[in-house]
Structures are given as C-alpha cells and as structure tokens.
Image (cartoon, rainbow, N blue to C red):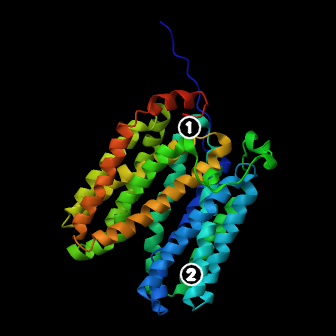
C-alpha cells in the first residue's frame, strides 16, 4: 500500500506578515472612524444636503483616480517607500480636518484623502500578497482581510461614540494616534518585492489609464466583487434607518455578530480556497448573504437581527477575502498591484453606485423591501459564478499547490 507523501506547508505567520496585518488593522480603524462622523460635522458647519453628499462622492473619486497610477508604480517599484508614503499621507490629511471651517476647503481635503486612501489600500494589499506563500494565498489573504473587516465594524461605532460624547477634535486625535501606530508598524516591516519587479525596466513599462486600471486576467472575479458590493451597499446606507423604522435598538448585534462569525470561519474558508479553489466557496458565501438580507428585512426584534448578523458574517464576511484572493491568484506577480487596485475600485464603485441607485428606489419602497430587492445581486453572483464556464475551481487548487499563478 503506497503511503502518501506529506508536503509541509509554507510558513504564513512570519514577523513581517503579522506586523502588516496589525498595521492595516490600525489604518482601517483610523480611517473608518471618520466615515459616519464627517457628514454630520460638515452639516453642522452649515453645508447643504448636496454638499454633504459630495463629502462621500469626492472621496470615492479621489480613490478611483489614483489607483491606475499606483498600479503602474507597483509594476517596478519597491514596496517599502510606497507604503510609507501612503501611511504618512493618510495621517497628514487626518490631522488637517479641524483646521478649516470652509466647506470647499474641506471638500479639497476629502479629495486628497481619497487619493491617499486609494494609494495606501492598493499598496498594502499588494505587499500582503507578496508576503503570503502561493500555496496559502487564500488563507493568508483571508486573515489580512479579517483585520480589515474587524476594523470596519468596530471603528464606526467608536467614532460615533466619541463624536456624540466629546468633540470632533477628540475624534481626530484618536484617529491620528491610530494612524501613527500603523505608521510605526509599517516602518519596521521587512518587505518582499518579487524578483520580476526588481528586474523590471521602468523604461519599457508604459503608463496608460486602461492598462493600469484593468488587469484582464482578473476581470471576472473583479466583476463579481462589483455585484456583491452593489448588493451590500444598501446595508451600509440604510440599516440604521431600518432599525429606527422597526424600533429595534439592538442593531449593534448585527455588526458584533457579523465580526465574530467572520473571525471564526475565516481560517476554514481560507484553507478551503487553497485546497478546492474559489468557485463553490463564492457560491455558498453569496447564498448565505442572500438569506441574511431576507432575514434582516423580515426582522421585528433583536433575534432576527442576531441571526442575520451571524449569516452575513459567514457569507459576506468570507466572500470579499475569497474574491480578493481569487483576483490576486489569477494575476502574474508583476501585475498584482494593478489587480489589487482594480479589486478595491470595484468595491468603491459597487458601494457608491448602490447608495445612489437604491437611494432613488427607496423613494418608492420601504427599507425592508429595499434589502429584499438588493439581495438579488447575490443571486446574480451565484448565477455568474456557477455558469461562467470557468474551470478555475479545479485549476486553482492544482496550480496553487505547485506555486503557479491561477488562470493566466
């Protein structure tokens, strides 16, 4: 009887990768504290409803515009310098916010903040995949994404609490401290730049908007990301309004249990991706997200909110990291910066467009029905993934085990 040869796994939790996960967690904490608090701050300055809306829009525009250039730089640049520029830029813009009472200047700050966020999120994600072994890319990027997920869930609640109970200046101080901690961690990491990047000749690499914005080999999972975040955008925009309509005070349970379940299942889903590929994993996660949104829409008490939060943590909380790993695994090393930028731009466009489109739809239906309508975006994710005709699920597992990029 032939014995199977056990091949030891490559080491994932190196010092550098651990520090990068921590640094990115603090970056997201610092940034996400400002998301729910800047609009009321600007409104208190006397801004119109249109100007408050611009606060979100100009930020997204800045992030999307800068990513093609960052993708271009990542094709031939060392990681350390780009990461430190991004972290310093985020910290600097954060500190500037309290120094103006003019809406137009604040909008300019917000545009610059979008530039720096697009810069930082793209280079940090690319540095992470550089540090993760090819045979553990799903697991590694899952943990990297978990730090982002937890930061995105904790920080808005913390920001609202500080803003409501103290001052905007105190909020900025805490945000800046978190940003400074992230900068410290970034500064002591030993980064790994792929050999193909080190040997790249800048003179032979041309910058183009399309070439630096789109990585053709990863268009499909990026499109799936766009659809998923378009469906998710209604929760970001309307869940607090929904809780007020239904008189449910324990809406925090959705976020709390979302984070807890996403944390618990992340090791399982990451290993699943590495062993079996993305296709079935994406389908199951999207199905859970669909059921969660219907559960949420029908909730009349904290029980429904809690169940929905658990389902959403297992579904959507695992879906985005799997999609990011899929995008990066399909991409050659020298194009991973571009692919990572495309992934984050898909998220920005999906959530931004969702707020605009479903904001109009909300004029005609109640919030519960809005969740039901947007949930069908996850059915579209299932359908596109299931009937894509791609054999990525099988090939990804085989190629990643041999350290080969997926579906070039």
Residue 328, x across and y down, in percent: 57, 44
Q: Which mark is residue 285?
A: none
| Count of marks placed on residues | 2
Question: In this image, 351 relative to 20: left or right?
Answer: left
Residue at position x 60%, y 86% from top? 105
The residue tagged with tag 2: helix, strand or loop?
helix
Q: Where is 219 relative to 134, above or below?
A: below
Q: Which residue is mark 2?
A: 107
Question: In this image, 391 relative to 108: left or right?
Answer: left
Mark 1 or 2: the one toward you: 2
Labels 1 and 2: the sequence-earlier one: 2
Instruction: Give the camera-side residue of 15 and 278.
Output: 278
Residue at position x 63%, y 50% from top? 211
Residue 343, x across and y down, in percent: 53, 53
Q: Which residue is mark 1?
A: 136
Q: Quadrant of residue 217?
A: top right
Residue 370, x across and y down, in percent: 26, 65
Instruction: Give the camera-side residue of 375 and 257.
Output: 375
């Amino acid at each position: 009887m032939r014995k199977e040869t056990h091949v030891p796994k490559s080491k994932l939790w190196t010092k550098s990768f651990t520090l990068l996960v921590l640094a990115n967690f603090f970056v997201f904490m610092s940034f996400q504290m400002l998301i729910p608090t800047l609009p009321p701050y600007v409104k208190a300055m006397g801004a119109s409803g249109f100007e408050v809306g611009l606060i979100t829009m100009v930020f997204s525009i800045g992030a999307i515009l800068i990513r093609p250039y960052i993708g271009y730089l990542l094709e031939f640049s060392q990681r350390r310098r780009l990461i430190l520029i991004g972290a310093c830029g985020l910290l600097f813009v954060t500190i500037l916010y309290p120094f103006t009472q003019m809406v137009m200047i604040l909008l300019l700050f917000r545009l610059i903040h979008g530039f720096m966020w697009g810069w930082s999120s793209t280079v940090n994600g690319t540095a992470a995949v550089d540090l993760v072994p090819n045979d553990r890319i799903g697991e590694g990027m899952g943990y990297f994404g978990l730090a982002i997920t937890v930061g995105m869930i904790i920080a808005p609640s913390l920001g609202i609490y500080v803003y409501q109970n103290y001052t905007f200046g105190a909020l900025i101080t805490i945000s800046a401290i978190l940003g400074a901690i992230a900068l410290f961690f970034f500064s002591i990491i030993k980064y790994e730049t792929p050999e193909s990047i080190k040997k790249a000749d800048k003179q032979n690499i041309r910058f183009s908007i399309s070439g630096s914005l789109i990585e053709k080999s990863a268009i499909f999972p990026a499109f799936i990301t766009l659809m998923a975040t378009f469906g998710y955008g209604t929760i970001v925009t309307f869940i607090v309004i929904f809780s007020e309509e239904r008189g449910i005070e324990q809406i925090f349970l959705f976020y709390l249990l979302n984070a807890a379940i996403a944390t618990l299942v992340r090791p399982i889903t990451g290993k699943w991706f590495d062993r079996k590929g993305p296709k079935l994993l994406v389908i199951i996660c999207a199905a859970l997200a669909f059921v969660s949104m219907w559960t949420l829409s029908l909730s009349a008490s904290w029980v429904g909110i809690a169940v929905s939060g658990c389902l959403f943590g297992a579904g959507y909380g695992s879906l985005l990291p799997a999609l990011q790993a899929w995008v990066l695994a399909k991409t050659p090393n020298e194009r991973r910066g571009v692919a990572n930028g495309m992934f984050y731009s898909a998220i920005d466009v999906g959530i931004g467009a969702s707020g605009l489109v479903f904001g109009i739809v909300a004029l005609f239906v109640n919030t519960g029905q809005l969740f039901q309508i947007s949930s069908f975006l996850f059915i579209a994710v299932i359908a596109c993934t299931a009937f894509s005709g791609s054999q990525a699920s099988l090939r990804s597992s085989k190629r990643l085990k041999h350290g080969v990029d997926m579906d070039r």
